[in-house]
């Protein structure tokens, strides 16, 4: 399935948001979902709902990590 992840097109077999997070975590070295926020098509999805959130062709997914700064 084709998704747009953080603005880049990707072919991915992940059927749900939790699976996609794990695929992306392996690629980017993320160790845990702590401090991670994910939006699908502009809507934030709570962590507890990641596994139940099905993905569809051409969904736009944004995965961001909270960072300290000033």
Image: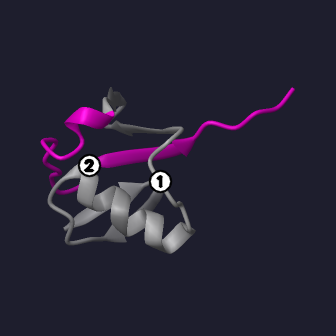
Task: Say which residue label 2 marks.
Answer: 59
Up the image or down, 28 lies above or below 45; here it is below
Residue at x 12%, y 42% (from the top left corner) = 52
Which image quarter: residue 13? bottom left
Could you classify mark 2 by the number of other residues whose Cα lies within 10 Å: few (under 14), some (14-19), or many (20 or more)?
Answer: some
Q: Is residue 28 left or right of residue 69?
A: left
Q: Earlier in the sequence, mark 2 or mark 1?
A: 1
Report the magenta residues as a range: 47-70
Task: Say which residue label 1 marks.
Answer: 32
Residue at x 26%, y 52% (from the top left corner) = 18
Task: Say which of 45 and 43 sits in front.
Answer: 45
Task: Say which of 29 and 40 sits in front.
Answer: 29
Q: Secondary structure at mark 2?
A: loop
Where does the image place residue 30, in percent across and percent down from the top left? 53, 60
Q: Is residue 51 left or right of residue 25?
A: left
The answer to whether residue 64 is magenta is yes
- Residue reaching furthest right? 70
Front: mark 2 or 1? 1
Residue at x 41%, y 56% (from the top left corner) = 5
Where does the image place residue 45, in percent across and percent down from the top left? 30, 31
Residue at x 18%, y 47% (from the top left corner) = 51
The answer to whether residue 50 is magenta is yes
């Amino acid at each position: 399935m084709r998704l747009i992840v953080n603005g880049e097109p990707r072919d991915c077999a992940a059927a749900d948001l939790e699976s996609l997070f794990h695929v992306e975590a392996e690629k980017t070295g993320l160790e845990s979902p702590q401090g991670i926020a994910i939006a699908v098509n502009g809507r934030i999805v709570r962590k507890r709902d990641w596994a139940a959130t099905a993905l569809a062709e051409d969904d736009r997914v944004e995965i961001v990590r909270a960072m300290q700064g000033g």
